[in-house]
Amino acid sequence: MNNEAPLLSVVIPVYFEEQVIDEFYLRLKAVLVGLKPRYRHELIFVNDGSGDGSLEILRGLSKKDPCLRVVSLSRNFGHQIAITAGINHASGDAVVVIDGDLQDPPEVIASMVDLWENGYSVVYGVREEREGENLFKRFTAKAFYRLINLLSSHYLPPDSGDFRLMDGAVVDVLKEMTEESRYLRGMISWVGFSQIGLGYKRDARYAGNTKYTLRKMIKFALDGLVSFSDKPLRLSSHFGLLMTLTSFIAIIALVVIKIINPEATMVGWTSLLVIILFLGGIQLISIGVLGEYIARIFHETKQRPLYVIAEKYGFGDKGAEAQLEETPKVADLTE
């Protein structure tokens, strides 16, 4: 009989966070130590190709803390892939995902654990307040959640993020989902199980600037929309049908006018040009929507690894290494 306390794994993606890591580690460690002796813990930092001193700081911490592991990717693979790499390395009974920029307070983890103990398989953070974010960022975030819930068949809780706790059963299912265009919030919602939101105040960045550029935000939004809904494709066909019916009605109207008044002259070259340009734009948009889906099919068929590992630190347990090797679509250069 195993009398060991349950293991809590915390996954932290890191990208150019050398100014924050030490403070983040101290606050997170204080929370996890406070959960003893009920829980053991492990910290899995994933260096997502940072070009600053982040990796050196993490190396130093791993030498001092036997509970700290470091996975360093060979280049920047993106936030969602970095989280995936950490989840694949986690061996806990529950896994917490939290960014390392201190916008999501580590102290909230204790409340998440309480809800998990009450039987919830997923406890996701809900951003009730957002400090340090401009009006444009808040508006686009709210608009995105409304849009994806309108188009998707799976409900995504508004104002939620990647900060969450997941039961081991949920994590096991996620490890089997190997698609390249990853939108983890939607994937976790799709998995099911009992889920509950936990409201909290999101802080401003402790230091440095956000790494989520407008271009990355747009790509992230497209991944969410395309991965969990085929309605954009259907909307294109529906709009095409609507325009065809409109054109048919217009033709009948013109014929009737000509029969009633043979002397009637059909004018309006400007309006005709506008209509042609409008329909041409709709056609190009529809082709673009179709292209987004085809591009993702193209990437999936190549079956490339989701990420490549350059270095690992703090993984003394060979069982964890063996577990990683069994995970599909992962390339590991440390072997």
Image: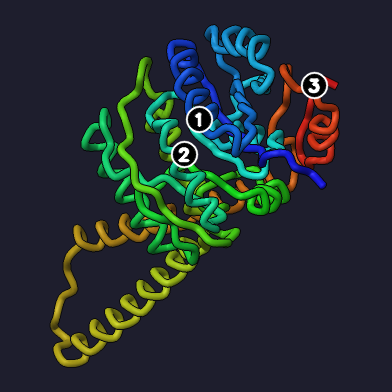
Is the residue marked by circle 3 packed among few (<14), some (14-19), or many (20+) residues within 10 Å? few
- Residue 227 visible, this angle: no
Q: Which mark is residue 34?
A: 1
What residue is at 46 percent from the left and 39 percent from the top? 110
Q: Earlier in the sequence, mark 1 or mark 2?
A: 1
From the top left corner, tell me how far across and down residue 237 is, in percent: 46, 69
Q: Is residue 142 left or right of residue 193?
A: left
Residue lying at 35% horizontally and 60% vertically, measured from the top left: 279
Q: What number of labels is visible? A: 3
Q: Which label was assigned to residue 110? A: 2
* CA separation in Å, label 1 and label 2: 9 Å
Q: Nearer the viewer, mark 3 or mark 2?
A: 2
Residue type, mark 3 in image: Gly
Identify the amino acid type marked 1: Gly
Residue 113, percent from left and from top? 51, 44
Left or right for 138, reference 195: left
Labels 1 and 2 touching (C-beta < 8 A): yes
Say which residue label 3 marks.
316
